[in-house]
Image: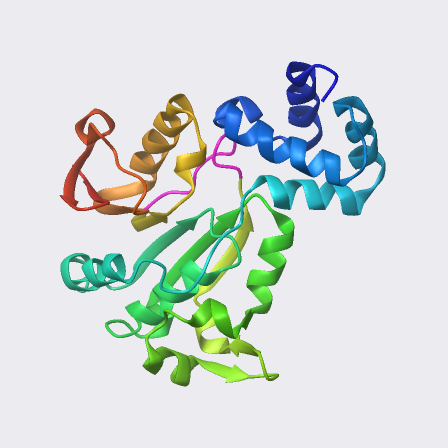
Amino acid sequence: MTDNYEVFKKQILSLTGIDLNSYKENQMKRRIDSLILRNKVSTYSDYISIIRNDRDKFEEFVTYLTINVSEFWRNPDQWDILEKQIIPNLTGLGTVKIWSAACSTGDEPYSAAMLFNKYFPFDRIHITATDLDKQVLKKAKEGIYEEKSLKGLPIGFKHKFFRNISETSLQISDEVKRCVLFKEHNLLKDPYPDNFDLIMCRNVLIYFTDDAKNHIYEGFNRALKKGGYLFLGTTEQILKPAEFGFTSVSSFFYKKV
């Protein structure tokens, strides 16, 4: 690009509420430059004009920026730990309250709802699922998925909770959908909800700077009940969990102390 990226970051913050200073710069700048070139412009200022005046291009930018990669039952070993080591400590609760942060297209919160239903009736499973991308939240609410995104899901869940609506697409059942409330939320600037037994935020924090991650860890700790759990992705780890009020329980699982 031929003009100032620092000015562009300020303009994006004003337009979208997304602070690009909180993302790892080299990685994010490469993604943005690639998208701008695909739109056949050569300056940040020209691209700002495009997304300011074209709502579809604006939504395309936000969706591209938020790096939505998701699938059901991603990293099965971690779901196994959740079931065998974490859920037994929650089964005495009247209801279980879960936050799926940066939930993307809903694969993760729906996976959690199906798993917890082995131990709780659906009306005692309350899941808040948030993302800053309106487009992926719309898709999540529809609950329609391609066959390939279910490839890791236990076969029993697929047969029990999905119905085919075309040769390649399936829709999740209403009983699972009713457990999940989808909301727009920006982890870097919005107030955090609270009183959760479990927070899931997986394969998202790797894109943030250390300062941004620290802010998020502190927010997650406040959002959990005492003794609640934080579930991160397999590429993420809190190196000094005690600094944020956590103790390590298992790989990528932390407990509020």
The reply to whether residue 178 is visible in this rendering is no
In the depicted view, which residue is nearer to us: 209 or 197? 209
| Vertical comparison of 213 with 231: above or below | above
Q: Is residue 103 left or right of residue 36?
A: left
In the depicted view, which residue is nearer to us: 38 or 121? 38
Rendered residue at 33%/56% (across/down): 97
Q: Is residue 85 left or right of residue 1?
A: left
Answer with the quarter of the image where residue 96 lies: bottom left
| Vertical comparison of 249 with 205: above or below | below
| Vertical comparison of 121 with 94: above or below | below
Q: Position of residue 42 (x, y in %)?
A: 78, 27
In the depicted view, which residue is nearer to us: 155 or 177? 155
Rendered residue at 35%/49% (across/down): 200
Q: Position of residue 153 (x, y in %)?
A: 36, 71
What is the magenta segment's predominant secondary structure? loop
Q: Is residue 116 left or right of residue 165?
A: left
The mark tally for this picture is: 0
Q: Quadrant of the C terminus?
A: top left
Answer with the quarter of the image where residue 45 lies: top right
In the depicted view, which residue is nearer to us: 33 or 193? 33
The span picked out in magenta is 186-195
Q: Is residue 18 left or right of residue 45?
A: left
Q: Quadrant of the N terminus?
A: top right
Q: Is residue 14 magenta?
A: no
Rendered residue at 34%/80% (across/down): 155
Q: Position of residue 198 (x, y in %)?
A: 29, 51
Q: Position of residue 139 (x, y in %)?
A: 60, 62
The reply to whether residue 76 is visible in this rendering is yes
Colour convention: rainbow
| Vertical comparison of 32 with 178: above or below | above
